[in-house]
Image: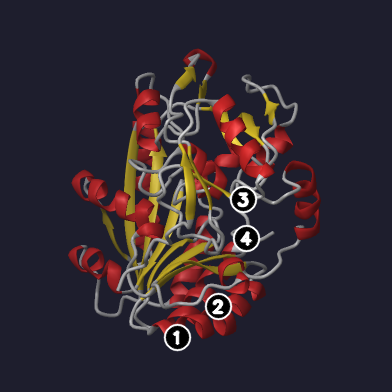
Amino acid sequence: MTTTQLPLPVAKECKPAGAEELARAIAQTAQENMPVYPCGGGSKQHWGLPPREPGLLLSTAGMDRVIDYPWEDMTITVQPGITLSRLARHLAQHGQHLPVDVPRPQVATLGGAIAANCSGPRRFGYGTLRDYVIGIEAVDGLGRPYQAGGRVVKNVAGYDFCKLLVGSWGTVGVVTQVTLKVPPAPQERAMLLRHLRGWSEAEEVLQELNTHPAQPVAVELLAGPGWQELLQETAAGPETVAGLLVVLEGTQEEVAWMSQELARGWESQGASLATLPEARQELLWPQLVDFPLAGRGVATVQATMLSSQVVPFVRELLEHAAQATVLAHAGSGVVLAHLEGLSEADVSPLVLRRLQPAARAGQGSAWLLGAAAGVERTHQLCWGGWPPGTELMQRVLEQFDPRRVLNRGRYVV
């Protein structure tokens, strides 16, 4: 069984070609007190609470232009409908990149990634989209345009407001233009895979990596049936409980040195490890990035916590869902899991009674990303309840969307 997309109850559709047309559409819809459902590539429409009222499907797919690219300043200004893959190709012409891993980059748009605050494996080394958005223009829930930040990296005016829009699910405003800082792309990448013989070893190795002279951009804990082919082909022993994948990026000299240092230390501990060849890396990387949307099993859950609590959380999860496939961004304290081998009725008790308490014990939270049609979706399941700062978020919305038209009923507030 795979997770399903949630159909939006569409009363009407609009695909504006620019910010003015988008603003008019929102203003008219707000006067009618009808919800507005912003949409980019549509790859994450099944995240969050399902929409319950017919509304305006507002597509930004027609707003996909590159506005300005002064590459010497390491910034780029684009419209929100540009896909992440097209943005990457554009930046590659000048050896630059946006080091944020968004699932299905061929489909996902920058605006959608900003709304959902997407981040992936390399969050550990590079941070999230909040670290790269330096200027933003948007339209609020009454159809009024506004802007924050600027086009210069050193310009910090309004920078906090740029951060507020990232991860707001489009409730604070629909983005119409974004300026990003774009650093140089790395020359080289290497992946080292260590086979873990027990959970205590996993905790020890992760702790050692915190002070290791090598500086990985990603530290991934792989467990469950979805990774068995990878672990078996790299000669894991039968006692292996999981794999630890370390991703290194930089210049050729930096990557070679970090790889040698890491391998030398692990070999001195008698560990089983493998350096993945480039062809295997190319196959594995999309699996890691697209994991949240892979749709294996009856549901997909995500949890955040202190990085020191990742291994205890994964053990708790596998104790109650032995067939789950887990990808943990262990260095960042983020755990993703496809729940396989469970019925639809098993999902809610597992998340509410086991995973959410375990995540709270690690000073984090857990929630449902996607699920099969028969799995219930409640506020507690999809958002983990009312997080700290909810009252502040509500006051912000009173100013920017007083009628609550933007993604009404789908977000945490």
Give the mark, 1 or 4, whose residue is nearer the N terminus: 1
Residue 364 horizontal/vertical position (percent):
64, 67
* Residue topped by disc 2: 355
Q: Secondary structure at mark 4?
A: loop
In front: label 2 or label 3: 3
> Quadrant where the C terminus lies?
bottom right
Residue kind at label 3, given as amino acid type: Met
Give the mark, 4 or 3, whose residue is nearer the N terminus: 3
Q: Nearer the viewer, residue 220 or 161?
A: 161
Residue 351 horizontal/vertical position (percent):
53, 78
Residue kind at label 4, given as amino acid type: Gly
Q: Nearer the viewer, residue 36 or 234?
A: 36
Binning the other alpha carbons within 10 Å of mark 3 as few (below 14), some (14 to 19) or many (20 upward) gives many
Which numbered marker is on residue 55? none
* Residue topped by disc 4: 409
Give the mark, 4 or 2, whose residue is nearer the N terminus: 2
Q: Secondary structure at mark 1?
A: helix
Give the mark, 2 or 3, whose residue is nearer the N terminus: 3
* Residue topped by disc 3: 34
Rendered image coloring scheme: secondary structure
Separation of disc 1 and disc 4 at Cα?
25 Å
Q: Nearer the viewer, residue 264 or 52?
A: 52
Q: Nearer the viewer, residue 114 or 256?
A: 114
Asked if labels 1 and 2 touch by Cβ distance under 8 angstroms, the answer is: no
Do we see residue 264 in this rendering? no
Q: Is residue 267 left or right of residue 56?
A: left
Residue kind at label 1, given as amino acid type: Asp
Separation of disc 2 and disc 1 at Cα?
12 Å
Binning the other alpha carbons within 10 Å of mark 1 as few (below 14), some (14 to 19) or many (20 upward) gives some
Separation of disc 4 and disc 2 at Cα?
24 Å
* Residue topped by disc 1: 346
Binning the other alpha carbons within 10 Å of mark 2 as few (below 14), some (14 to 19) or many (20 upward) gives many
